[in-house]
Structures are given as C-alpha cells and as structure tokens.
Image (spheres, grey):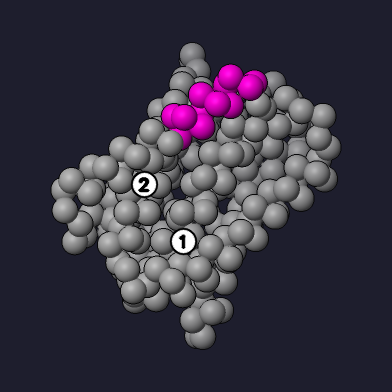
Amino acid sequence: MHPWLHILGLTLLPGLAMPLGALLALHEHIHPRWLETELRHTVLAFGAGALLAAVALVLVPEGMRGLPTCLVAVSFAGGGLLFMLVDRFLAAHRAAASQAIDMLLDYVPETLALGAAVALGSPGGLLLALLMALQNLPEGFNAYREMRRGTRFGNRFIIGLFTLIALLGPLAGVCGYLWLAPYPQAVGVIMLFASGGILYSVFQDIAPQVPLQRHWSPPLGAVAGFLLGMVAQPLGA
C-alpha cells in the first residue's frame, strides 16, 4: 500500500470515531434513565481503560526508547502540566467543552507521532490507531453530551465540529511523516508529552465520574477497554 494511503487510513480510523461517538449519543430517548446512569458511566470507564492501554502499551514504551531519563521526565511531566493549565483556564471561564478540547489535545500529537511511526517503519502504528479509535469513540460520546448540555449548539453543529477535528488527523499524520521521521527523539518526546496529558485527563476528568453505587458494569468497562488494548497489541506488532 502507498504510504500516503496508509497514513490516511490509520489517522482517519481514530478520527471518525469521534463523530461516531457523538452520533451514538444522539439516541437519548432510548431508556433515558439507564443511559444517564449505567451506560454513561460504563462508556466513561471503557474510554479510561482504552486511554490507559494506549499510554501503557504504546506511547510510553515507544516514547522512552532512546531518550535520556531527564528528557523522559520533562516530556511526560510537561504534558500533564499543560493539560492542567488548560483545565484551569476552562474552569475559570466555565467552558462547556473541556472534554472536546481534551480530545483535540490528545488526538493531534498522537496522529503526529503516528505519521512519524509509519515513516520509521514502527510496527506499533496499527496498534496505536486501534487504541486511539477505542478511546475516541467514548470521548466523542461524552464530549457531545457535555457540549449539548452546556451550550446552545445544535446536533449538526457539534457533529460537524467533531468531523472537522477528525480531519486534522490526516493533516497531522502527513506532517509527522514528512518532517518528524528524521528525528525519532522528537517523536518520543511527543508520545511522552501526550501520555502525561492523557494520564492527567483520566484521573482529573474521567475517573471521578465513573463510580456508581450498586452498579458493577462501569469498572468492568475499564477492564474491557484495557483488555482490548492488550488483545490488539499482537495485531500491531
């Protein structure tokens, strides 16, 4: 397959999972109480599991390869600090799009690294794309619900916005392929930076919303999300 088509497919797969998640969230008329409680919490937990799988199985191991310890620490901590600053800014301005912005901040550096990984011939490209799709589906679901409740934007506007965000993926992937491939250390820094930000998001925004009394599927959702990452790992090797 031509490298350009390969990058296009790998980056569009996780990108289109965002508007797909929003489309799934449109069906609020089906058992609304169940949707609001158990399903919503299970989707959140599944997304958290997939995010942790992406960090633990791909981003951190690939990112640390060949980097000195001090640069690993600075890159990882820098991602967490940036996400914290963005989070505080959104909280101060009462923005109702924090999850959508987190989704964008995850997606762009991941696709940059993905494009560079393809150029370097890394076997982890397909696995990273699959894990990104797994994380973007529930992120799109929850970001849609957050924006729908906190803003006056209509369904078409939100889904169109998520589709535009998805199209940034191929652009970032091509940039990574063209410009970052000669600099594998820069790719590692981006992966670790994204990992720090993802870990911050999981424990700041996602994990606190997961617990639900007398319901056991949400924690199983986290297990399922991480398990899918583990099962998919040999496919990307």
Q: Is 18 a magenta residue?
A: no
Q: Looking at the image, can residue 103 be seen?
A: yes
Q: Is 88 a magenta residue?
A: yes
Image coordinates for residue 49, horizontal then vertical, percent: 41, 40
What range of the chain is rendered magenta?
83-94
Occupied quadrant, residue 90: top right
- As rendered, which of 117 and 50 lies closer to the eye? 117
195 to the left or right of 86:
left
In the rendered view of the protein, which quadrant contains the C terminus? bottom left
Occupied quadrant, residue 4: bottom right
The chief SS type of the magenta part is: helix
Residue designated by label 2: 193
Point 58% across, 66% down: residue? 170
Secondary structure at badge 1 equals: helix
Q: Which mark is residue 161?
A: none
**Three-letter amino acid code at disc 1?**
Leu
Residue designated by label 1: 112
Q: Residues within 10 Å of mark 1 (few under 14, many from 20)?
A: many
